């Protein structure tokens, strides 16, 4: 997976490649998907959600440019797979999930795998985690109609990075915003497809 799906497609950070090689992806999947854990695809989770394709996880992680002193917010814990990867590259990870059963199973797994720097919360992550802000990096792993103002406000003004899929419910652009003071620079990284961010600053309801 690391060589053919990640390095060959342009993931360059040795640290990201190393961590992607270490974290056991199969542990985060339901039993029926485990045999495909290292396949080049997103895989179904419980409650209609998905674990992103390994390449997408690596590309988003690399784009965050994490250092070991960073405090990171993740919106959409899901299985906890991406959370586990972030936790090995940053100082503290705050992750919000709206579906309680997913958050509970992620919590158990992350504990078992020794991710002691992870803080989980059940709620609407489109509003961020104001009490723990500012964040050096924010990753949203669900698709938003626009960049939520609350997340921009919780990004560190000293070079904070926000990576988020923005578009309609079916196809999105993965955007990277970098904040310096009150100025946000925005770059499009690639096309992508995520499940919807459902919440006050996301989409309404679960939709079609
Ligand atoms: N990073 C996850 C991907 C999970 S899919 C993984 O590696 O497994 C996206 C997740 O975002 C889903 O679990 C979904 O329930 C969650 N989600 C959607 N809207 C949300 C919101 N407003 N706040 C928090 N989580 C949300």
Image: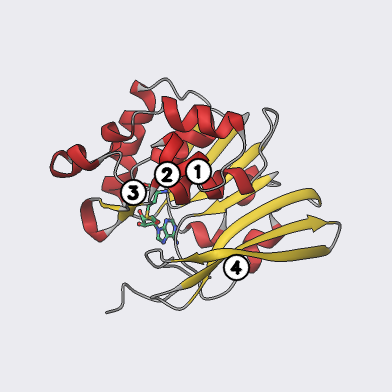
Q: Classify residue 29 by image quadrant.
A: top left
For the residues bearing labels 3 and 1, Cβ distance under 8 angstroms: no
| Left or right of residue 76: residue 130 | right
Kindly report which numbered mark, 4 or 1, lies closer to the viewer in this rendering: 1
Query: Which secondary structure, mark 2?
Result: helix
For the residues bearing labels 2 and 1, Cβ distance under 8 angstroms: yes
Q: If you read the primary sequence from the N terminus, does the residue marked by circle 3 or circle 1 appear first?
A: 1
* Alpha carbon distance from label 4 to label 3: 30 Å
* Alpha carbon distance from label 2 to label 4: 31 Å
* Residue that mark 1 sits on: 8
Query: Which secondary structure, mark 3?
Result: loop
Percent x, y for residue 198? 41, 67
Query: Considering the image in quadrants, where does the C terminus appear?
Result: bottom left
| Left or right of residue 151: residue 20 | left
* Residue that mark 4 sits on: 148
* Residue that mark 2 sits on: 5
Which quarter of the rendered image does ligand 1 occupy? bottom left
* Alpha carbon distance from label 3 to label 2: 7 Å
């Amino acid at each position: 997976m690391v060589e053919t799906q990640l390095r060959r497609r342009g993931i360059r950070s040795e640290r990201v490649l190393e961590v992607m090689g270490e974290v056991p992806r199969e542990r985060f999947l339901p039993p029926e998907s485990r045999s495909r854990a290292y396949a080049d695809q997103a895989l179904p989770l419980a409650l209609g959600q998905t674990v992103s394709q390994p390449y997408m996880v690596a590309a988003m992680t690399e784009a965050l440019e994490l250092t070991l002193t960073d405090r990171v917010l993740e919106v959409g814990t899901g299985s906890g797979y991406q959370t586990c990867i972030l936790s090995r590259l940053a100082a503290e990870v705050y992750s919000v999930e709206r579906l309680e059963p997913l958050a509970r199973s992620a919590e158990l797994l992350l504990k078992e795998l020794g991710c002691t720097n992870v803080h989980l919360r059940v709620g609407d992550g489109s509003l961020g985690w104001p009490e723990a802000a500012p964040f050096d990096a924010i990753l949203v792993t669900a698709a938003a109609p626009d960049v939520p103002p609350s997340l921009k406000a919780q990004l560190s003004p000293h070079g904070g990075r926000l990576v988020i899929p923005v578009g309609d419910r079916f196809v999105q652009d993965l955007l990277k915003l970098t904040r310096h003071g009150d100025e946000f620079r925005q770059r499009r990284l690639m096309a992508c497809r995520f499940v919807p961010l459902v919440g006050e600053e996301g989409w309404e309801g679960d939709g079609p």
